[in-house]
Amino acid sequence: MNKMKETKEDRIWKKAVKERDNYTCQVCGKKDKRLNSAHILPWEIKETRNDIMNGITLCITCHTFGKLSCHKNPIWFSDWLMNNKPTQYYHCMQRFKEWLNQEEKKSTHMDMIDWDNPVKLEKMFKPLNKERIE
């Protein structure tokens, strides 16, 4: 989780996720005292932060450190979630789509970009690329 102070709602969410998953890592099946309640969609998305369907119980290896952890290999984890927890996967994808639509409505500067004109796009992003190279 973020380095923000944990709220009462965060603690309730974590406990509810672990209880739903029977205090078991949903990927490897490990039962451990140090299990994590992990967000499927980023914690920063306030609209899904306390949604229990946006949580999954993972051991520290499957959450963060293993080769196939959701942080080191998010594409693998997304595929695993779709195949093993389809209801949860599609719920999260729907919520993410709703969030993107809301963000798109807030963003007026993105509407001003001519995405179909490669020459204009190159001119617009060339200074950014130059700064990154130097």
Image (cartoon, grey):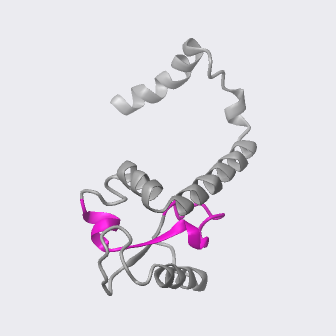
| Residue at image coords 40%, 84% | 23
Question: From what the image shows, is residue 47 above or below residue 15?
Answer: above
Viewer-proximal residue among 30 and 97: 30
Horizontal placement of 29 versus 97: left or right? left
Residue 92: % across, % down:
58, 58
Residue 96: % across, % down:
61, 53
| Residue at image coords 57%, 69% | 53
Viewer-proximal residue among 14 and 77: 77
Horizontal placement of 132 versus 128: left or right? left
Res. 21 in view: yes
Q: In the image, is residue 83 part of the stretch drawn in magenta?
A: no
Residue 123: % across, % down:
54, 17
| Residue at image coords 47%, 29% | 128
| Residue at image coords 31%, 66% | 62
Q: In the image, is residue 43 part of the stretch drawn in magenta?
A: yes
Viewer-proximal residue among 57 and 90: 90
Q: Which residues are magenta?
A: 40-66
Res. 134 in view: no
Horizontal placement of 51 versus 128: left or right? right
Question: From what the image shows, is residue 63 above or below residue 134?
Answer: below
Residue 134: % across, % down:
33, 30
- Outermost residue toward the top? 119
Question: From what the image shows, is residue 121 above or below residue 134?
Answer: above
Please state, as top left, top right, bottom left or bottom right, where the N terminus lies in the image.
Answer: bottom left
User: Quarter of the image holding residue 36?
Assistant: bottom left
Viewer-proximal residue among 134 and 24: 24
